[in-house]
Image: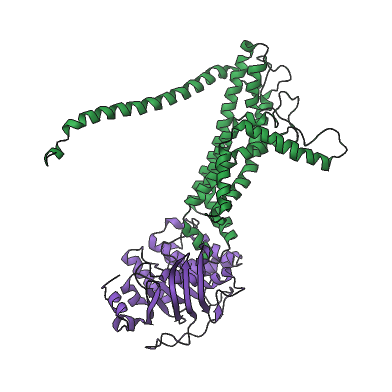
Amino acid sequence: MTLHGRWEVGGGSRRGAAWSVLFTGATGLATALILAMLAVILVNVAWHGWPALSWRFVTAGTEADMFEVGKAGVFPMIFGTTARVILMTLFVIPVGVTTAIYLHEYAHTTSVLTRVIRTAVANLAGVPSIVFGLFGLGFFIHFLGDRLDLVLHPDNPKPIWGKPALLWASLTLAVMTLPVVIVATEEALRGLSPGLREASLALGATKLQTIWQIVLPNALPGILTGGILAVSRAAGEVAPLLFTGAAYYMAELPRSLTDQFMDLGYHVFVLSTQSPNLEQTRPILYGTVLVLLLLTFALNATAILVRARMRRRQRAAG
Amino acid sequence: MDDVSLPKVRLPEPAPEPSPGGAGAGEALLRTEGLSLWYGSARALHNITLGIPPHRVTAFIGPSGCGKSTLLRCFNRLNDLIDHVRIEGRVAIAGHDLYGPGVDAIELRKRVGMVFQKSNPFPKSIYENIAYALRLHGLRERRRLDEVVEQSLRGAALWDEVKDRLHRSALGLSGGQQQRLCIARAIAIQPDILLMDEPASALDPIATARIEDLILELKQRFTIVIVTHNMQQAARISDYTAFFYLGELIEFDTTRRVFTNPSQQQTEDYVTGRFG
């Protein structure tokens, strides 16, 4: 190549431009495909589900008939799904945040224990959800529940704790979503300027005071992001509930943590596999799916609103 | 400020004007003896012995990596937070060994305040930045808090600029104001010693001048140790200067002598700008 040749870029660039167009097109097509799939799902569900939605549908139960339009309702499932998601959040946030604080603020980064915990968290995230269901059955119901029954109600032949329940289902979901919360919280802690911690410690604050009063309030939006991700993941899960708490049918709403509950996701499964007449049940099925989607969005939107408010308040002052 | 009843160690009376030759010998408030420090296997400080006189400004100068910030952080045991730090020798304030058994680093840091290179106000209101420090020390009564917050902000020459927006975020202040807020926060709890790690290196000349004026004012009440890269700054504001090179204390004397008639060739080369 001559000295001038280096600057004659016209020849090669035409082929480059062609590739560029092709590549842009391919990425655009991939994006469009994803959007199209999402649109098909949402439009399909909304289109078929909307007619089924009525005040009666979202406030009634299934006492009259589970599979017949006009008689069936999904209120017990809305209640059950909301309850298990909120309970799960109450369990997973404290444990996840505490773990992340230990990992980021206390543990030596190079210690064997830290590495073991991190590997465990990463692997936990990759376990199929049905396995969490089996874990919940084995650990919470049979290991914990049976022992609680032995200790608390030794004379009662019927198990109270050692059976599927709202409590065990929520705990199982909490174990499943733990990695999400830990990772998001650690990310939030890492994002804080180390100068903040030093400033507090140099004023004579203890580590605990620094974490409690400086680190955590500033990491709160990040922690809530973890909570939002956990809720998103858990709200639609069915597999972990199969053995741990979801009921096919219950005449009443759960009244205690040891009761079983009906669940929207599980109900979709019930409607699509147990109906004597699927054609007749289909509108209810669509309606239930639409309610599940709306509930998931609503739970997420609430968490996002809380986070946005918190950020605004933090920016305004302390 | 004298009526503020916070826990405090009584200080020796201010030393007489710096006497040439003897760098505060005998009357030192803060003294290190044969102090060495290692990060893992890397030795950052070599056998440092020096005495810092009370109510004076002592400047630590030297090229980057010479150990001056590391030494500063020995004085409030902020190095404790770093893994694999090992210390030998002695650091004492008014005769009390800082690294002795039974010494509480938390208590120590209430008596040795620090201002950092990068201003680090908390993402709270201006008022809360200072109130946080006071509450750590058990001051809760609202009226007293208001008083001490005002005194501290006045002490840091910031009151007039922020008195109308005490409850707005500290992050809305300019860089120089943020740094003065950090100084206000540090002096609010009335430490005996104020450590300053290049407090003006990120500021413009006007903000720097204000910080320097402030330091000269603060030395009436505090013993100040300041790390600086700025030779003119050291010459302007300090009474004593210590020159460090590669973790060793090369020379420690009155600032006038260090800058006009140093005893070591290396010091002369550095202060005249021949290296560093």
Can residue A306 be seen? Answer: no
In the rendered image, the quadrant that contains the C terminus of chain B is: bottom left
Image position of A109 with respect to A300: above or below: below
Say which residue appears at 57% left-offset and 17% top-offset. A51
- Check the image and tell me how it is coloured: by chain
x and y percentages locating residue A23 in the rendered image? 32, 28
The residue lying toward the viewer, choosing from A5 and B99, is A5
How many numbered circles does the render carry? 0
Who is closer to the viewer here, B252 or A64?
B252
Residue at image coords 45%, 71%: B72
Residue A124 coordinates in the image, percent (x, y): 58, 39
x, y percentage for residue A77?
Answer: 67, 27
- Residue displayed at 56% across by 51% down: A114
Q: Determine which quarter of the picture holds residue A133.
A: top right
> Residue at point 46% right, 58% down?
B170
**Left or right of A261, for residue B247:** left
Question: Residue B45 versus residue A68: which sits nearer the camera?
Answer: B45
Chain shaded green = A
Q: Position of residue B270 (x, y in %)?
A: 30, 74
Colour in which the image shows chain B = purple
Please say if A208 is above or below B194: above
Q: Quadrant of residue B236?
A: bottom left
On the question of residue B177 being in view, the answer is: yes
